[in-house]
């Protein structure tokens, strides 16, 4: 059973997956490849001078895979429900269970609504500063929690925030993800 299931493989979902996978949590990402990043060209993403959304996604997916994340490309999540131990994730290809679920489905808030997440007056998913929803161990990120501030760099930060909260819960103390050059292996896809 994966520790973390991430629904959505755009910037927020891949950011969350990178942090959880590289820090030892079994992580699965369900990606329909319908992210807005395919229409983007990044000039305003810190540390990136200029990159197409497609190229950015290829690099990000490679990072997640290299750090142990399991990407299920073109596997659409059809339902998520709470269980005694976490969540059951249903797709056309099968059922999965996970302790935590991170929703990173852009402006599509239907899964959050189905599992009973609270919403704000503006129709967005209500989250804490750590991206936690009203449903225990369920997080929401990116455009689903913001009425208008839809930026890749904001979404990446949301995904990282959710992942750090999950890692802190798993480790029993506030977790910092800070690498030094000596900590980072050089991998072929980078």
Image: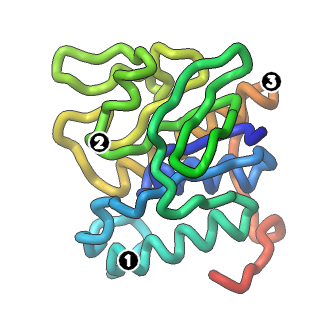
Return the disc, 1 or 3, that comes first in the chain's sequence. 1
Which residue is depicted at the point 51% across and 16% down?
Answer: 135
Which callout, 1 or 3, points to the residue nearer the camera? 1
Find residue 142 and report its image quarter.
top left
- The image quadrant where one finds the N terminus is top right
Which secondary structure, mark 2? helix
Which residue is depicted at the point 58% across and 16% down?
Answer: 136
Please tell me whether residue 77 is drawn above or below residue 128 in the rendered image.
below
**Residue to which mark 2 is pinned:** 143
Location of residue 112 in the rendering, given as x and y in whole percent from the top left corner: 39, 27
What crowding class fits label 2: few (fewer than 14 Cα within 10 Å), some (14-19), or many (20 or more)? Answer: many
Which callout, 2 or 3, points to the residue nearer the camera? 2
Q: Is residue 43 visible?
A: no
Between the residue at mark 2 and the residue at mark 3, the CA separation in whole angstroms equals: 29 Å
**Residue to which mark 3 is pinned:** 172
Which secondary structure, mark 3? loop
């Amino acid at each position: 059973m994966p520790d973390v299931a991430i629904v959505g493989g755009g910037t927020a979902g891949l950011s969350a997956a990178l942090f959880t996978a590289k820090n030892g949590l079994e992580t699965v990402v369900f990606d329909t490849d319908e992210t807005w990043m395919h229409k983007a060209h990044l000039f305003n993403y810190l540390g990136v001078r200029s990159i197409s959304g497609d190229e950015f996604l290829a690099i990000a997916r490679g990072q997640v895979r290299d750090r142990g994340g399991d990407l299920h490309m073109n596997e659409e999540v059809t339902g998520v429900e709470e269980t005694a131990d976490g969540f059951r994730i249903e797709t056309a290809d099968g059922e999965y269970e996970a302790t935590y679920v991170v929703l990173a489905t852009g402006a599509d808030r239907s899964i959050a609504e189905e599992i009973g997440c609270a919403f704000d007056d503006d129709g967005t998913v209500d989250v804490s500063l750590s991206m936690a929803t009203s449903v225990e161990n369920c997080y929401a990120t990116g455009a689903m929690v913001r009425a208008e501030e839809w930026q890749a760099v904001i979404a990446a930060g949301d995904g990282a925030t959710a992942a750090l909260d999950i890692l802190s819960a798993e480790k029993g103390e506030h977790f910092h993800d800070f690498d030094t050059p000596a900590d980072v292996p050089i991998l072929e896809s980078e």
